[in-house]
Image (cartoon, grey):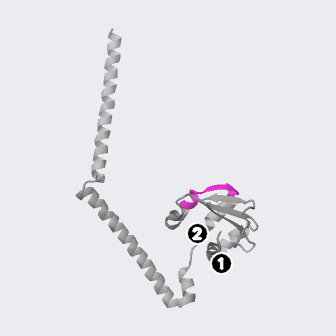
């Protein structure tokens, strides 16, 4: 793991006693995390923090993340770990997955140390409102684009027409199945007569 990423992860671990406690049980063991061409090998210290490990050393567990790992990390961290390929210690892999799924950054606390409590609280609140505003804007754009493509330009069929079409296809399929059964009965009766 590069030094910056390791520093960030250890900073998050330093603020979470429960996470370090879980990792202490695996002190001395190594984990290799691979994403595309990048590979990080870390060793769990006796204090439950992560240290750089020799990349050539045998890893206790090897975890290969899917190609869309960055997107999943931002949108659904639990899906990220469920899509990973794991080799080696399943117990260590599960512990690492649990820790990283539940590890949270207390941004307000860190900002308060730099800017003071009031500015930190206002900054975090502003960032949260900005994120909500952007998410709302993205939803509105998607809804408007959907309406434009289905109603105004008719490039994409609206859901109600697709559902209606599927219902009609189901009716025709059922009618055809009944017709085939009748034809089979008539052919069987005709064979018995001859």
Residue 22 lies in quadrant: bottom right
Residue 56 in the image: x percent, y percent?
74, 61
Residue 30 placement, left or right of 133: right
For residue 33, above or below residue 182: below
Label placed on residue 14: 1
For residue 142, above or below residue 157: below
Earlier residue among tags 1 and 2: 1
Residue 60 in the image: x percent, y percent?
73, 60
Q: Residues within 10 Å of mark 2 (few under 14, many from 20)?
A: few
Q: Residues within 10 Å of mark 1 (few under 14, many from 20)?
A: some
Which image quarter is the N terminus in?
bottom right
For residue 179, above or below residue 101: above
Total labels drawn? 2
Residue 115 in the image: x percent, y percent?
53, 90
Residue at image coords 75%, 59%: 58
Indicate yes or no whether the magenta region holds residue 16. no
Q: Can residue 27 be seen? A: yes
Element at label 1: helix
Element at label 2: helix
**Which callout, 1 or 2, points to the residue nearer the camera?**
1
Residue 148 placement, left or right of 106: left
Residue at the extreme left? 152
Out of 45 and 174, give the one closest to the viewer: 45
Label placed on residue 102: 2
Residue at image coords 32%, 39%: 170
Label placed on residue 176: none
For residue 46, above or below residue 91: below
Per the rendered image, the range of residues in magenta is 79-90
| C-alpha gap between disc 1 and disc 2 | 14 Å
Residue 116 in the image: x percent, y percent?
53, 91
Q: Are marks 1 and 2 in contact (CB under 8 Å)?
A: no
């Amino acid at each position: 793991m590069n030094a910056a990423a390791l520093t960030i992860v250890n900073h998050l671990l330093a603020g979470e006693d429960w996470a370090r406690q879980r990792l202490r049980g695996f002190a001395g063991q190594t984990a290799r995390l691979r994403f595309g061409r990048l590979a990080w090998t870390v060793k769990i210290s006796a204090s439950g923090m992560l240290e750089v490990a020799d990349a050539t050393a045998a890893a206790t567990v090897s975890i290969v993340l899917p190609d869309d790992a960055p997107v999943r990390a931002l949108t659904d961290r639990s899906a990220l770990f469920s899509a990973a390929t794991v080799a080696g210690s399943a117990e260590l892999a599960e512990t690492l997955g649990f820790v990283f799924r539940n590890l949270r950054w207390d941004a307000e606390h860190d900002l308060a140390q730099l800017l003071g409590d009031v500015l930190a609280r206002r900054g975090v609140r502003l960032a949260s409102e900005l994120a909500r505003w952007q998410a709302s804007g993205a939803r509105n754009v998607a809804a408007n684009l959907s309406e434009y493509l289905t109603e105004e330009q008719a490039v994409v069929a609206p859901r109600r027409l697709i559902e209606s079409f599927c219902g009609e296809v189901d009716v025709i399929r059922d009618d055809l199945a009944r017709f085939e059964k009748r034809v089979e009965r008539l052919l069987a009766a005709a064979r018995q007569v001859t």
